[in-house]
Amino acid sequence: MTAADLVAACSATLQPLEAAANAAWWDANVDARDETQRRRADAELALSDALADPATFGAIRAARSEHRLDPLVARELDLLEQSFAPNQVDADLRREIVELQGDIESRFARHRGTIDGESVDDNELLEVLRTSDDTARRTAAWVASKSVGEEIAGDMRKLVRLRNRAARSLGYRDHFALTLATTDFDEGLLFATLAEVDQITSTPFRTLKAELDEQLAHRFRVPVDALRPWHYDDPFFQDAPSAIGVDLDPHLREADLEELTVRTFEAMGLDIRNVVARSDLVPRAGKVQHAFCIDVDRGGDVRVLSNNTASARWAETMLHEFGHAAYFDGVGRDLPWLLRTMHFCLTEGVAMRCGRLVNDPEWLRRVADVPATTVADLAPQLRAASRAQLLVFARWVLVMTHFERGLYAQPDGDHDDRWWDLVERFQLVQRPDGRHAPDWAAKIHIAAAPVYYHNYLFGEMIASQLAASLGGLVENDRAGRALGTRVFAPGATQRWDHLIEQATGSALTPAVLARELAS
């Protein structure tokens, strides 16, 4: 069998299994029940069983060593090895991991916190943290947002141990190292980049945080050193509060977020109406409360899950998720199936570039129909909001990435306290007095998207580099065409770092964030 024949055979086997697993995963997120979770686990295990075949894995490795391979076939073999390698573990262990992860995610989807005995969803909790001046009610909302952590923390630690056992059976230090090794990231270079981002953002973030805390102390009539996590707008302080940016909710209260999103992308020459039609965008019980985009079959079945309310937060989320959708939908359909995808950080970069439009004066005026005089008045605040969001989010990624590396290094360590050590170090948010709880476990990504958060930081860097290279996106079909041809169409034909350098004309470095913050 030639290398090309091997790739074709693998693709024929994997394509229907992956589509079935993705469709089942979608069903389990839009309707979290025992039945949908069982179907999801069965579909994921069927795909995992195919990827676990040792004979095929051996053939893939042998084929990669052949000389004079066609470049696309060589790239397909690289991607096959990255997919097969993590699955070369005991079948019972794989099943236990899949079932436990699915169970945790299902419990996340069904969980609702309570305030004064009343069940509340995440949108209601965030509304309290964004608007209420009642510290007692804010505290109750924040505690409610963390309640899922106490429910699933024990199983989270068990899942981490299982993932580590699988990784070590393959010769890796732990799951953290395995994930980086099979997603084109070098751990040493990653943490060198994180250290550089820490250095670039430390002083401006400290200044920003001091200004924010002065405002919050005045608002809540407490000394600065009495501020605690519930005084910020987001339970994890991963988004910039309106106090250091701008409150756009009054200008978007009447907006039809679906139509606004369609108009945004159509003006870039990107048609997303078919994706909107397949999507699930309304909050309800039993549905996961965050947002994501999924390419079910690498053939046009792209969907977005969201939980929209008429607000700036969900306007940004829609622009972000449909940035993913435009990318998934724009990958060259003439490419081989295995190459009809992209690296995580590339799609995050496009999504973040699109999400930033919510603070773009031109987008507000020309797409969201905010009056020109209002936009002119808001312009300084909009720039401050964009800069603040970049700083706040970069510091949050430092928390998450360092935390996960430590979690996998020592699953049974005191991560309840270590979490707050990192929050205080990178975010300058003081831990609650006397609290010792698994607040880290309330972050769904640790279960559902492990060792992923660094992709968001690289996505921010890519978003800034795309902005510098392609210019504005608002009603700019030239920029839309450039994204389509330079970024979307190549799919996974190249490594992510090679593709972004080719698309923008320069290698990606943290210096792009320094320039963004200084502009």
Image (cartoon, rainbow, N blue to C red):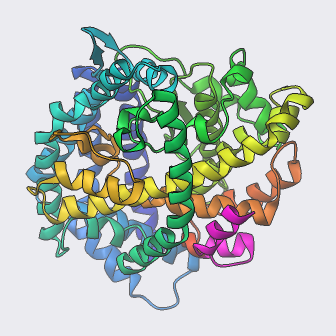
Quarter of the rendering occupied by the C terminus: bottom right
- Does the magenta run of residues contain 414? no
Image quarter of the N terminus: bottom left
Between 302 and 8, the one nearer to me in the picture: 302
Which residue is depicted at the point 56% across and 53% down? 208
Q: Residue at x 23, y 69 (%)?
A: 55
> Residue 109: in sight, yes or no?
yes
Q: Which quadrant of the view contains residue 407?
A: bottom left
Q: Is residue 460 left or right of residue 12?
A: right
Q: Quick check: 292 left or right of 324?
A: left
Q: Is residue 499 magenta?
A: yes
Residue 195 picture quarter: bottom left
Picture coordinates of residue 14, whole percent (x, y): 38, 52
Q: Position of residue 293 (x, y in %)?
A: 52, 39
Q: Residue at x 60, y 45 (%)?
A: 324
The span picked out in magenta is 498-519
Q: Position of residue 438 (x, y in %)?
A: 18, 41
At horizontal 30% and vertical 11% (from top left) the residue drawn is: 119
Compared to 511, does 357 lie above or below? above
Quadrant for residue 285, please give it.
Answer: top left
| Magenta stretch, overall SS | helix
Task: Report how many numbered discs are placed on residues in the image.
Answer: 0
Residue 339 can be seen in this image: no
Which residue is the extreme one toward the right? 372
* Relative image position of residue 313 (x, y in whole percent): 58, 31
Q: 29 or 510: nearer the eye? A: 510
Residue farthest along the bottom direction in this orientation: 67
